[in-house]
Amino acid sequence: MDGDWYDSTKTILDNLYDQITPRGYVQVDDYGYWEGCKKAVDKFDTARGLNLSKQTIDACGISFTKPN
């Protein structure tokens, strides 16, 4: 996903996360670059109680696997 800002990243997660199959991969561009993107992902993770295991891809990107 490449939402950059808080609102666009939150919208992506709110509308599409539940459609991802268990153990499906999500890649987030700009998590390490745009503060709004990081905040949206982290708040979504906390609000859902997911405790996502975020893996660094490069200086900006992360990925995680949707839990079962």
Image: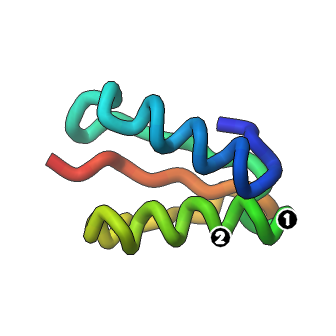
Of residue 14 and residue 19, the one placed in the foreground of this image is 14
Q: Residue at the spot x=64%, y=36% of the render? A: 1
Residue 58 % position (x, y): 75, 59
Amino acid beneath label 1: Tyr
Badge 1, how many Cα within 10 Å: few under 14, some, many 20+?
A: few
Q: Which residue is mark 2?
A: 39
Image disc number at residue 33: 1
Q: Residue at the spot x=74%, y=38% of the render? A: 2
Q: Are marks 1 and 2 in contact (CB under 8 Å)?
A: no
- Secondary structure at badge 2 equals helix
The image quarter containing residue 3 is top right
Is residue 26 depicted above or below 48 in this figure? above
Residue 7 % position (x, y): 71, 50
Q: Is residue 25 left or right of residue 41?
A: left
Residue 51 % position (x, y): 32, 72
Residue 45 % position (x, y): 41, 65
